[in-house]
């Protein structure tokens, strides 16, 4: 190899080492700038009323979405626990059996948490506006077939179940300043929708 080529090879090698070294330094520098996670930081989520959900909404969603071949299985982001479907194994020493014991209160709470946990930020925006534009929630967009839903159409806007859910989402839980509202009531008309939904196929 000629002296000129040797010098070119050495120069190229040195240049590549500098680039690689510089890149590594950049990565190290970038990683050293990341702050330590704050374990005490809490992001508040505005959620709909739990008691109204347990009393009026959960049973309908159990029947509509909670079968073992639908959302009554552990692999789903939105999981539904119920008497006829998936059971919550962390209670009663795992002794709950599908088709036997009634849906437990802890299972209703888990269903509520799974629903809210799908899109907590979107749920917060919705509840802060007293349930305005509820169809922005993926939880409703999929069964309405506004987005692809493996289970096909499971709701329509004129279903009593849909009306029950929307009425629940529109129960005010915070005032204009973000303060919690204590007396939360589902209207008699909305309760009627929920009652009709319990028998809806």
Image (cartoon, rainbow, N blue to C red):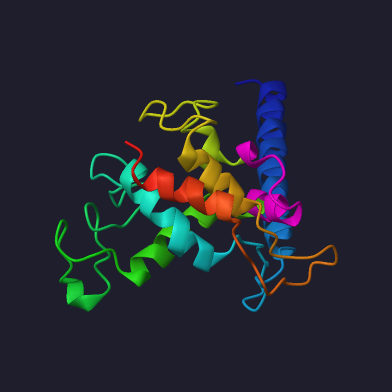
In this picture, residue 115 sits left or right of residue 187 = left
Front-most of residues 57 and 75: 57
User: Residue at image x 24%, y 61%?
Assistant: 87
> Where is residue 71 shown, x and y percent of the image?
33, 45
Seen from this angle, which residue lies furthest right? Answer: 177
**On the rendered image, what quadrant is the N terminus found in?**
top right
Q: Is residue 49 visible?
A: yes
Question: What range of the chain is rendered magenta?
Answer: 122-136
- Please check the rendered image and state whether residue 27 is part of the magenta-colored stretch, yes or no: no
Observer-nearest residue: 67 or 94? 67
Q: Main secondary structure of the magenta part?
A: helix
Q: In this view, does 171 lie above or below 177?
A: above
Asked if residue 69 lies left or right of residue 196, the reply is left
Q: Is 117 situated above or below 65?
A: below
Q: Position of residue 12 (x, y in %)?
A: 69, 31
Left-right relation of 114 to 178: left
Q: Which image quarter holds the C terminus?
A: top left
Query: Eyeballing the image, is 59 above or below 34?
Result: above
Compared with 66, 32 (above or below) is below
In-image side of 114 versus 132 (left or right): left
The quarter holding residue 48 reads: bottom right
Whether residue 130 is in magenta: the answer is: yes
Q: In the image, what residue occupies the spot 59% across and 59% down?
A: 186
For the question of whether residue 113 can be seen, the reply is no
Name the spot of residue 18 as percent of width and height, x first.
Answer: 72, 44
Q: Name the residue located 42 percent from the left edge and 50 percent from the top edge.
A: 195
Q: Which residue is drawn at 66% across and 28% down?
A: 9
């Amino acid at each position: 190899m000629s002296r000129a080529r040797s010098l070119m090879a050495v120069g190229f090698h040195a240049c590549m080492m500098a680039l690689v070294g510089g890149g590594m330094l950049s990565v190290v520098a970038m990683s050293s700038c990341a702050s330590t996670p704050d374990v005490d930081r809490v992001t508040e989520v505005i959620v709909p009323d739990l008691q109204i959900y347990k009393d009026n909404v959960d049973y309908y969603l159990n029947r509509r979405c909670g079968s073992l071949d639908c959302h009554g299985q552990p692999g789903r982001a939105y999981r539904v626990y119920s008497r006829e479907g998936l059971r919550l194994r962390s209670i009663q020493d795992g002794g709950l059996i599908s088709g036997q014991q009634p849906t437990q209160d802890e299972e209703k709470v888990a269903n509520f948490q799974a629903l809210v946990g799908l899109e907590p930020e979107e749920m917060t925006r919705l509840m802060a506006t007293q349930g305005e534009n509820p169809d922005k929630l993926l939880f409703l967009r999929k069964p309405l077939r506004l987005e692809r839903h493996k289970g096909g159409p499971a709701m329509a806007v004129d279903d009593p179940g849909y009306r029950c859910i929307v009425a629940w989402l529109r129960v005010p839980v915070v005032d204009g300043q973000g303060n919690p509202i204590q007396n939360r009531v589902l209207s008699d008309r909305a309760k009627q929708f929920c009652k009709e939904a319990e028998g809806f196929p």
